Image (tube, rainbow, N blue to C red):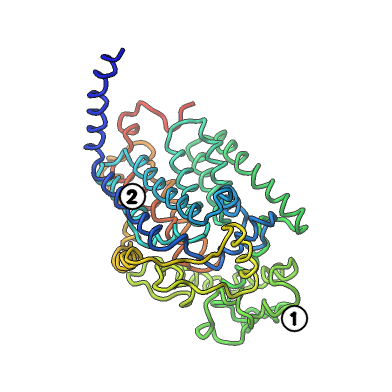
Amino acid sequence: MTSVVRAAEPALSGRWACVARRHRWFLVVLALGTLLRALAMLGYRPALWFPDSYTYIVTVFKPRPDLVRPAGYSMFIKLLEPFHSFAAVAVAQHLLGLATGVLIYRVARRAPRWAATLATVPVLLDAYQVELEHLLVSDTLFMFLVVSAVALCTTQKTSTVAAIGLLLAAATLTRTVGQPLIVVFAAWFVLRRRIGHAGVLLAAAMVPIVAYGAWFYATYQRVGLIGANGAFLYARTMSFADCARMDPPPDLKVLCDPRPPGQRPPSQEYIWAKDAPLVQLPGITFTKETDDLAARFATLAIVKQPLDYAASVLTELGRSFRWDRPVYPDPEIYAYYQFPVTPPGPPGRYPAQVGAEYAKLYEQGAIGTEIVEPYAGWLRAYQSMARLPGPLLLGVLLVPPVVAIARRRSGRLAGAPSWPVPWSVAIVLLITPAAAAEFDYRYVLPAVPLACLAAALSIRPDLRNQSGSQKEFSE
């Protein structure tokens, strides 16, 4: 028996050496990505805070639906509570970032290895991606869930359809921008004439979403997952809404801003600023009455000024593709996406102060961020150089349709391509915030790995399409 084991050891080591040689460039990128995340853990201890972070912590200790953000990310933090360390949360998020890179490479295996490796570079090596993973916000978890759903969609297994639905439900309950993605996946199955698969996906997705909606209704006697959709859409329309053209009824006129659109603040100020018309209404900003009023105003603005709304959405979307990185929407929010030189100050707003007290209970000690040099300085220097410029992201998004058109003209397109799902998801993730809320730099990052995956998959048809011997999903 011993001789058999000894004989097997060289074969096993040889196999691993062969695998390492075959995937050596990806392993180099993965190792560098791991090093960057280790520097983040060493340089900014235990994690970085964002204004939203405190709200999530409140939900951890007071389990109830929040009116602005679904509770999925709070439940993720709750799972890690036994460690009593936000460092554990940051480590978990960095591991999710690395796992996303591995998933992208695994799914892109049908493309040339150089293309599959390049597809992982933004998610593994972009400094802003690493910084986002170190922030206590929901975007990294959301990105991993969506990429996992896309990865399962390429496995050719019918048994994964329900899992895709559950992953999309989890993504939706982490960030509500996941809702339209359920429609995207279901539409893909319908287009592939897999009606049963679409039904299974919708059923699997709706069960947890309806359950959460029932919890939300039991808490607030309101239908929905959050209670701020109207307020956010109202804020979006305030970049162009002209009450002189809208002629709103008397109850909506209180939400008008007499200033010309060019002199108005960024959209989100109409939700959070103390002097905003919506905030000055009686009661809290997100009561049902206030949110319904805001929704009516926004609907009227879009109906009366559809071209202005479309132009406003395109303007916000265009910020994703700029070469430079201008300060937007304001210096405070912009600064949260940079590795800081000095520790961030204490939370300012009242709800955040409450969350800070709960955070101390979670940590079982003081909270804050300790900046440790030289590691933090190395990351700041790296962040000043390493990011995906907007025009390059636009170029990546254009690769799949351009390649598809070229192949169709040459008659080399065979079977159904595999890039439309990740490409469509990336497009939806970019457009939805611009249409329903406002552009934000952190909203762009979850779309990037999917755009890169779509570009890699579009470089050549799937092997199964070339052989014609396999179907996309086995019966």
- Going by the numbered disc 2, the residue's amino acid type is Thr
Q: Is residue 133 visible?
A: yes
Residue shown at 74%/66% (left/top)?
288
Q: Is residue 179 visible?
A: no
Query: In this rendering, is residue 290 above or below 36?
Result: below
From the viewer's side, name the closer residue of 249 and 118: 118
Q: In which image quadrant can residue 464 be found?
A: top left
Instruction: Residue 250: give its label.
Output: 1
* Residue 294 percent location from the top left of the image: 67, 71
Residue marked by disc 2: 120
Number of residues whose C-alpha sits closer than 10 Å to that of mark 1, classed few (under 14), some (14–19) or many (20 or more): few
* Residue 152 percent location from the top left of the image: 46, 38
Q: Quadrant of the N terminus?
A: top left
From the viewer's side, name the closer residue of 235 and 219: 219
Element assignment for label 1? helix
Number of residues whose C-alpha sits closer than 10 Å to that of mark 2, classed few (under 14), some (14–19) or many (20 or more): many
Q: Residue furthest front?
A: 365
In the picture, measured across the screen, residue 240 lies left or right of residue 335, that is right
Q: Cα distance, mark 1 to mark 2?
A: 54 Å
From the viewer's side, name the closer residue of 435 and 362: 362
In the picture, measured across the screen, residue 72 lies left or right of residue 152, that is right
Residue shown at 38%/65% (left/top)?
372
* Residue 123 percent location from the top left of the image: 37, 54
Badge 1 or badge 2: first in the primary sequence: 2
In the picture, measured across the screen, residue 84 lies left or right of residue 337, that is right
